Amino acid sequence: MRHSAPACPTRQVIGRIGDKWTLLVLYALGEGTLRFSRLRSEVEGISQKMLTQTLRALERDGIILRHVYATIPPKVEYSLTPLGESLGKAIATVRNWSYAHMDEIVGARQVYDQRHSMADPDP
């Protein structure tokens, strides 16, 4: 199966984890179980709607567990499943690589921007 085919497992997984909100939610839950409001404060800039959509998608994929307590008002907590924990380890590798190489990336961007800002805007 080609990696670019819609049914390709790699494409499906990258489609889920390639989203910035998904990665940030997984980073936050990597620290432990959190309630919705705490997750929202941990993931700066995410709207309530986007957090809800992200959590539902991750729950559907078996990456997180949503636990509802029968209290008034209802208490809802989110945590990583074993599948989510294994994904968290893979994502940690990307995060560590990002931190280790950010200076190089910033430098490359500056060189690129300087080179292209001096270029003639007409092709």
Image (spheres, rainbow, N blue to C red):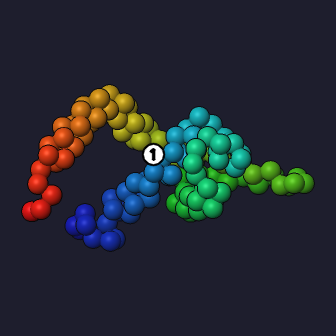
Point out the image quarter for the N terminus. bottom left
Q: Is residue 72 above or below residue 41?
A: below
**Residue situated in front as seen by the camera: 80 or 107:** 107
Picture quarter containing residue 60? bottom right
Visible in this render: residue 15?
A: yes
Q: Residue at x 36, y 39 (%)?
A: 94
Left or right of 90 on screen, residue 112: left
Q: In the rendering, at what x and y percent does residue 91 appear? A: 41, 41
Q: Residues within 10 Å of mark 1 (few under 14, many from 20)?
A: some
Left or right of 101 on screen, residue 57: right
Q: In the rendering, at what x and y percent does residue 12 appear? A: 38, 63
Q: In the rendering, at what x and y percent does residue 50 appear? A: 58, 59
Visible in this render: residue 86?
A: no
Picture quarter containing residue 82? top right
Q: Residue at x 47, y 41 (%)?
A: 88
**Residue situated in front as seen by the camera: 90 or 94:** 94
Q: In the rendering, at what x and y percent does residue 59 appear? A: 59, 58
Q: Amino acid at mark 1?
A: Leu
**Residue situated in front as seen by the camera: 9 or 33:** 33
Q: Is residue 105 above or below residue 13?
A: above
Left or right of 49 on screen, residue 19: left
Q: Is residue 12 above or below residue 104?
A: below
Point out the image quarter for the C terminus. bottom left
What residue is shown with label 1?
A: 87
Q: Residue at x 87, y 54 (%)?
A: 73
Looking at the rendered structure, the secondary structure element under dot 1 is helix
Total labels: the figure holds 1
Q: Residue at x 27, y 70 (%)?
A: 5
What residue occupies the far bottom of the structure in this picture?
A: 6
